[in-house]
Image: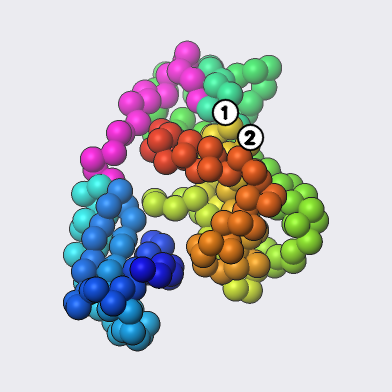
């Protein structure tokens, strides 16, 4: 059974081709989409079937997201928030509004006196994470691209729901900002993973061998994300 992957509606769809399969079967598991098809079915027909099932797929993905653990943060002083695998406590101060900063080993947000706005604190922390994710990913992509001798076009940040990164054939790489909450080695793995798509734009055995060449412990990182990724939330 041969595997291949395509992008569809902000999701990575795995296609499994087999001579034993006589009709198309679409399965959604843990926000991933698997399509089992006859070996010789044209890719355009598969894409058309996915398009016809788009609403059903979106509903299934939404159900899986609802089943995932939700953040129980209240955004009050004393709560911990992770950055590169380390936890930092939040301090909510009163005064003229100052957005989130990481100073002296803690996150600090200043609100006007009498203001108790969890949404505002969350938005401020989100802006901080996105800004620093962009800085950190740009640094890491540049460093690993030099090591791996690959050329990329751009690095961007998004709030993906069900993926950690994306790489186009043109070399535009996008990362989920939430990865920046994970340990530094996990962030490195996601960077190497996406850069390897500049060499093999699929998830073939050759692709994974390329990942392993630059990150021998990639399987441990992959497993860490599988078991802990849902916790990377504000």
x 23%, y 40%: residue: 67
Q: Is residue 200 above or below residue 176?
A: below
x 20%, y 78%: residue: 22
Say which quarter of the image contains residue 74. Answer: top left
Q: Is residue 109 visible?
A: no
As drawn, the residue found furthest toward the front would be 20
Q: Which residues are magenta?
A: 65-81
Was residue 58 drawn as part of the magenta stretch in this picture?
no
Residue 169 location, x and y as percent? Answer: 60, 73
The label shown at residue 139 is: none
Foreground residue among 224 and 67: 224
Was residue 70 drawn as part of the magenta stretch in this picture?
yes
Quarter holding the C terminus is top left
The reply, left or right, for residue 116 in relation to residue 83 is: left
Q: Badge 1 is on which residue? A: 85
Residue 121 location, x and y as percent? Answer: 46, 30
Q: Residues within 10 Å of mark 1 (few under 14, many from 20)?
A: some
Q: Is residue 146 above or below residue 107?
A: below
Q: Is residue 89 above or below residue 7?
A: above
Q: Secondary structure at mark 1?
A: loop
Separation of residues labelled 2 and 1 (CA atoms): 7 Å
**Cβ atoms under marks 2 and 1 closer than 8 Å:** yes
Q: Earlier in the sequence, mark 2 or mark 1?
A: 1
x 58%, y 32%: residue: 183
The label shown at residue 184 is: 2
Q: Main secondary structure of the magenta part?
A: loop
x 49%, y 20%: residue: 80
The reply, left or right, for residue 179 in relation to residue 119 is: right
Foreground residue among 142 and 42: 42
Q: How is the image coloured?
A: rainbow
Q: Secondary structure at mark 2?
A: helix
């Amino acid at each position: 059974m041969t595997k291949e992957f395509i992008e569809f509606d902000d999701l990575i769809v795995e296609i499994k081709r087999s001579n034993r399969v006589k009709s198309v079967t679409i399965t959604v598991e843990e926000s991933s989409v698997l399509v089992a098809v006859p070996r010789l079915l044209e890719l355009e027909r598969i894409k058309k079937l996915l398009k016809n099932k788009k609403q059903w797929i979106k509903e299934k993905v939404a159900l899986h997201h609802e089943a995932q653990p939700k953040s129980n943060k209240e955004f009050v002083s004393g709560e911990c928030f992770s950055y590169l695998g380390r936890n930092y406590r939040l301090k909510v101060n009163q005064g003229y509004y100052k957005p989130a900063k990481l100073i002296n080993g803690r996150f600090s947000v200043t609100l006007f006196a009498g203001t108790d706005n969890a949404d505002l604190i969350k938005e401020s922390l989100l802006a901080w994470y996105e800004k620093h994710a962009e800085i950190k990913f740009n640094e890491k992509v540049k460093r690993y691209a030099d090591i791996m001798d690959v050329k990329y076009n751009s690095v961007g940040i998004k709030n993906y729901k069900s993926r950690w990164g994306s790489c186009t054939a043109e070399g535009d790489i996008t990362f989920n900002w939430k990865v920046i909450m994970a340990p530094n080695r996990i962030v490195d793995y996601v960077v190497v993973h996406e850069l390897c798509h500049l060499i093999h734009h699929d998830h073939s055995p050759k692709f994974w061998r390329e990942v392993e060449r630059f990150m021998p412990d990639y399987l441990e990182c992959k497993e860490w994300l599988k078991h802990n990724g849902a916790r990377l939330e504000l």
